[in-house]
């Protein structure tokens, strides 16, 4: 006992080593595990491992989210810049496309319109708060003269008020000093178009008795000697009676699509005002026009189905009877043989002309008298069958 | 040379006094070391050569300067390490028991607060731990394990360096007397 206490440390070491050797030997010998010790160790370690793993995964996820968010922010910024650039590019392409379409429309209008025109581009606007004046890039060197009309495919725009060598001043139809002769499409009412300094114009000098309907279109009448007849002017928006003339307001059709390219009419050719296209009126349905009527006389022997009265049809029947029997009405002497009105003119052969049998009676007779004893004398002429 | 040996050997009562740690520190650091060896190599394979449970055993044994306490700390940590391995219980337990005992015995004679001593002891006990484990595995379990001396020396040096840093951190947890 003294020996153990003297070598206490060494004894404890040997004891612990021996115990572990026994434990090890037991496991090796029995090929069994000491589960309890492992359960303790695992139970002690795994909660910490779970906490550490949770902290690690959350930290990694947070870092990933941060990096991802930062990347997304960078990408978002890049995409915004790209979007802005594409918007600008798109706007530019749209503008180019619009310019090309307007140029094509001008070209088509120029080729179809009989008037000789020259294309011009608006390069500036005139000064003055209320004035509606623009400058175009064609002048006297291009043949432009003061008083020429300025139009586009949609309608009239104005007239040249001053022609310089390289540019011209154009007074727009919305200017208060502008005036032009116009005519309505449907009722052919003439008036004078005047600018109001606004987007719409007024058609003046139309009597209240005249009929102007909203939606009706106005065309140039050619009366002003500036605009050729038949160019579109605008559409009526308001039409009401006034004193002393009717108040008619028109929205100019030529200015609706902007004002960039125009045509200057060098030599105007009048055109007819197109017929009213009522079908184009909104909210109204019109049937197409009826087909042509059948020709008169078709389907009836006497041609009585055509237009006309019963007397007309009877006259036609007598003509046919006379032609079938070689008789000419009005040529025979009084008392000569009349044609047989009972014969069917389609089957009767034409008879040779007979000489008058007796001299004409003295004046006072009403007509040729039929010979006595002939069936024609006894049988009065039957009226021609009435055709339905 | 004599001056150097005076610095390493315990020269005063203060240097020979054993360090005291709160029990929860002892438990938590031991569990943390085992957890480190179990968990961290999943993500950093090269850290599997770091024998942190051995360093914890060494530290507590050196500073407690009590062979019985040191051997029990070594046995507990070794058995816990065995429990999480596929080997029979007792292999790491026996080895770390011996390490704890001898480290506490060394701590009674040397100034283990000196970093050079910690470096040397860390290197030595790592080599001892690996060699003795290899001997036990061959002798008791009949396993034909290879023992690469050069690699073991290299890892010993690595663990010794880590031990110096790790012991410095653990010094902060000591109770001030």
Image (cartoon, coloured by chain):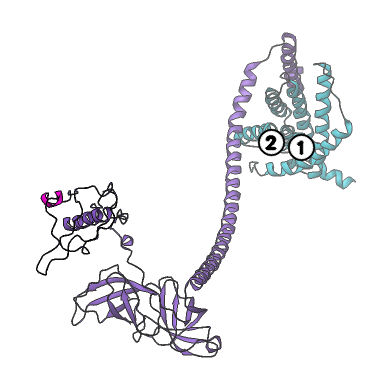
Chain colours: A purple, B cyan
Which residue, given by chain and number where applicable, does mark 1 sit on?
B46
Q: Is residue A378 magenta?
A: yes
Nearer to us in this view, B147 or B92: B147
Nearer to us in this view, B159 or A357: A357
Mark 1 to mark 2 CA distance (whole Å): 10 Å
Q: Is residue A14 magenta?
A: no
Q: Give the range drawn in magenta.
A: A373-380
Nearer to us in this view, B120 or A94: A94
Which numbered circle lies on residue B40?
2
Both labels 1 and 2 in a single chain? yes
Residue A285 in view in this figure: no
Q: Which chain is mark 2 on?
A: B
Q: How crowded is mark 1: few (under 14 residues within 10 Å), some or many (20 or more)?
A: few
Answer above or below: position of A79 versus B108.
below
Nearest to N terminus: mark 1 or mark 2: 2
Answer above or below: position of A8 versus A220.
above
Q: In which quarter of the view is residue A156 placed?
A: bottom left
User: Residue at (29%, 52%) from the top-left corner?
Assistant: A350
């Amino acid at each position: 006992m003294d020996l153990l206490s003297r070598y206490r440390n060494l004894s404890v070491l040997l004891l612990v080593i021996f115990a572990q050797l026994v434990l090890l030997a037991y496991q090796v010998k029995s090929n069994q595990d000491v589960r309890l010790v492992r359960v303790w160790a695992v139970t002690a370690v795994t909660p910490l491992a779970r906490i550490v793993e949770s902290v690690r995964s959350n930290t990694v996820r947070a870092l990933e989210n941060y990096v991802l968010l930062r990347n997304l922010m960078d990408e978002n910024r890049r995409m915004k810049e790209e979007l802005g650039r594409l918007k600008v590019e798109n706007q530019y392409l749209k503008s180019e496309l619009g310019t090309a379409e307007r140029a094509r429309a001008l070209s088509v209008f120029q080729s179809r319109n009989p008037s000789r025109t020259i294309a011009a581009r608006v390069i500036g606007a005139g000064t003055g708060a209320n004035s509606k004046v623009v400058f175009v890039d064609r002048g006297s060197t291009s043949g432009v003269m003061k008083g020429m009309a300025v139009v586009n495919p949609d309608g009239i725009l104005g007239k040249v008020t001053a022609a310089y060598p390289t540019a011209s001043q154009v007074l727009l139809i919305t200017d208060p000093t502008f005036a032009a002769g116009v005519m309505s499409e449907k009722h052919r009412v003439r008036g004078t178009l005047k600018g109001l300094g606004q987007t719409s114009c007024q058609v003046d000098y139309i009597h209240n008795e005249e009929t102007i309907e909203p939606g009706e279109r106005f065309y140039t009448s050619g009366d002003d000697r500036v605009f050729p007849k038949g160019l579109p002017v605008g559409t009526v928006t308001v039409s009401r009676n006034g004193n002393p003339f009717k108040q008619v307001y028109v929205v100019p059709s030529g200015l609706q699509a902007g004002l960039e390219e125009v045509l200057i009419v060098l030599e105007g050719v009048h055109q007819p005002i197109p017929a009213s296209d009522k079908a184009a009126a909104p909210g109204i349905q019109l049937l197409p026009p009826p087909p042509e009527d059948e020709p008169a006389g078709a389907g009836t022997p006497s041609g009585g189905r055509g237009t006309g009265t019963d007397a007309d049809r009877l006259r036609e029947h007598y003509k046919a009877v006379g032609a079938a029997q070689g008789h000419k009405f009005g040529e025979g002497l009084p008392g000569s043989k009349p044609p047989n009105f009972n014969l069917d003119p389609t089957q009767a052969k034409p008879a040779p002309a007979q000489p008058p049998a007796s001299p004409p009676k003295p004046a006072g007779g009403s007509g040729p008298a039929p010979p006595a004893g002939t069936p024609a004398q006894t049988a009065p002429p039957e009226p021609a069958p009435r055709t339905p | 040379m004599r001056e150097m040996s005076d610095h390493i050997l315990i020269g005063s009562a203060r240097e020979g006094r054993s360090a005291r740690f709160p029990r929860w520190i002892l438990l938590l650091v031991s569990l943390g070391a085992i957890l480190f060896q179990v968990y961290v190599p999943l993500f950093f394979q090269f850290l599997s050569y770091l024998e942190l449970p051995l360093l914890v055993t060494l530290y507590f044994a050196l500073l407690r300067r009590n062979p019985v306490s040191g051997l029990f700390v070594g046995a507990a940590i070794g058995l816990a390490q065995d429990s999480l391995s596929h080997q029979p219980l007792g292999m790491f337990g026996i080895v770390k028991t011996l390490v704890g005992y001898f480290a506490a015995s060394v701590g009674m004679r040397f100034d283990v607060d000196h970093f050079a001593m910690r470096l040397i002891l860390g290197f030595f006990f790592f080599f001892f731990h690996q060699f003795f484990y290899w001997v036990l595995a061959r002798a008791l379990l009949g396993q034909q394990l290879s023992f690469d001396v050069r690699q073991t020396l290299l890892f010993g040096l690595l663990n010794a360096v880590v031990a110096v840093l790790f012991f410095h951190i653990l010094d902060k947890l000591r109770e001030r007397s």
